[in-house]
Amino acid sequence: MNTGIVYAALAYLSWGLFPLYFRQVADVPALEVVLHRTLWSLVFVLALLAVRRQWAWMREVLRQPRVLGAFALSALLLAANWLTYVWAVNNGHVVDASLGYFILPLVNVALGYVFLHERPRPGQWLAVAVAAAGVLWLTVQAGRLPWIALVLALTFGFYGLLRKVAVLGALEGLTLETVLLAPLTLAVLGAWAWQGQGALAQGDAATLGWLALAGPVTAVPLLLFAAGARRIPLATMGILQYISPSLQFALGVWLFHEAFDPARLTGFVLIWAALLVYTLEGWRSRRRVQPA
C-alpha cells in the first residue's frame, strides 16, 4: 500500500513539475516539441522493451485491426493533448492548463455516464454541476470559453476512456501509440532537417539534449502511474491526482507570475469546491460500503 502511494505520488509530482521542463525548450515551437516528445518517447520505450524482452504482444496486436484503430485514435488524442499543453506553458497559460486537470475528474464522471453506462451518485452529480458553474463563471468573465482547460480535460478524458477499455498495459500502449505516430513524426522532422530548419538542423547541443530528455520525462511518470494504480485503490488515486494541477497552478501564479485577478479566483473556487464535494462524497460512500 505505501509503495503504491509513493509510486503514484511521484507520477503526479512529475506531471505537476512539467512546466519547468517545457520552459527549457520554450524557444522551440510547440508542434516541434511534440514531435520530438513522440520520437524520443518511442526510443525510450523500445529500449525498455528490449531490456525486458517484452515483444510477444506486438504479434498479437498486429492481427487485431480494431485494437490498432482504437490506439490510433488514442494516439491522436494524446498528441492533441500534448500540443495544447506545451503551447499553453510556453505562451504564459500555465494556470489555464492547471484548470483543465482540475476539471478532468469531473469530466471522467460525465464520460463514464455517457459511454460506460455508469450511474454517478447524487453527490457526484452535484460536484459536476458546481464545476460547470465555475466554468460558466470563467466564460462570462473572460467573454469566451476557457478553451485551453476544456481541450486539455476533454482530450485526456477521452484518452483515459479509450485506455480504460484497452487490452494493453501502460508500457505496451505507449509504445503502440508512439509507433503509430512515428511515420508522420519522422517525415516532418526529416523534411525540416533536410531544409535546414528546426532544432535538428539549427539547435545547439543544450536544446537537443533537452528535447531528447522528453523520452524519459514522458515515459517514466506513466510507468510510475501504472505501478501505483496496481497497488492502491482507485479512490486513493483520485485524491492523489490533485497534486499535479495544484503544483501547476502554484508555478503559474508564484513562479511565472501569470495574471490572476479576483474575478477569475471565484471560478477556481467553484471548481475547487466541486472537487471537495466529489472527494468527500467518495469517502463517505466507501465508509458506508466497507462495514457491509
Image (tube, helix red, strand yellow):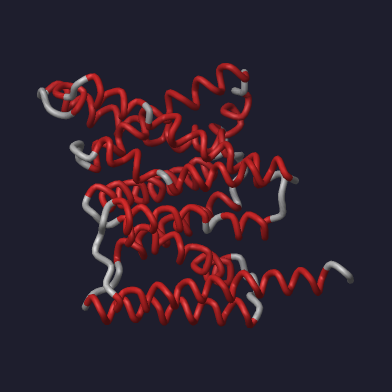
Check the image and report above or below for 112 versus 164.
below
- Residue 169: give x, y in percent of width and height: 61, 39
Which residue is at a point 35% across and 61% down the rendered structure image? Answer: 151
Question: Is 151 displayed left or right of 196 in the figure?
Answer: right
Among the 4 quarters of the image, the one containing residue 209: top left
Residue 225 at what x, y percent from top left?
Answer: 58, 43
Q: Quadrant of the C terminus?
A: bottom right
Relative to 61, say whether 96 is above or below: below
Which of the pair 28/255 is nearer the observer? 255
Give the camera-side residue of 1 and 117: 1
- Which residue: 67% across, 70% down? 282
- Left or right of residue 122, residue 286 in this image: right
Q: Residue at x 29, y 78 (%)?
A: 263
Which quadrant of the structure image shows residue 196? top left
Which residue appears at 43% of the width and 23% of the height?
43
Residue 217 place in picture, x, y as percent: 43, 34
Percent coordinates x, y for residue 69 in the rendering: 47, 45
Which of 145 and 283 lies nearest the eye of the viewer? 283
Q: How many numbered circles does the render carry? A: 0
Foreground: 55 or 81?
Answer: 81
Tell me if residue 23 comes above or below residue 260 in the rendering.
Answer: above
Q: In the rendered image, which quarter is residue 96 located in?
A: bottom left
Left/right of residue 281 with respect to residue 147 in the rendered view: right
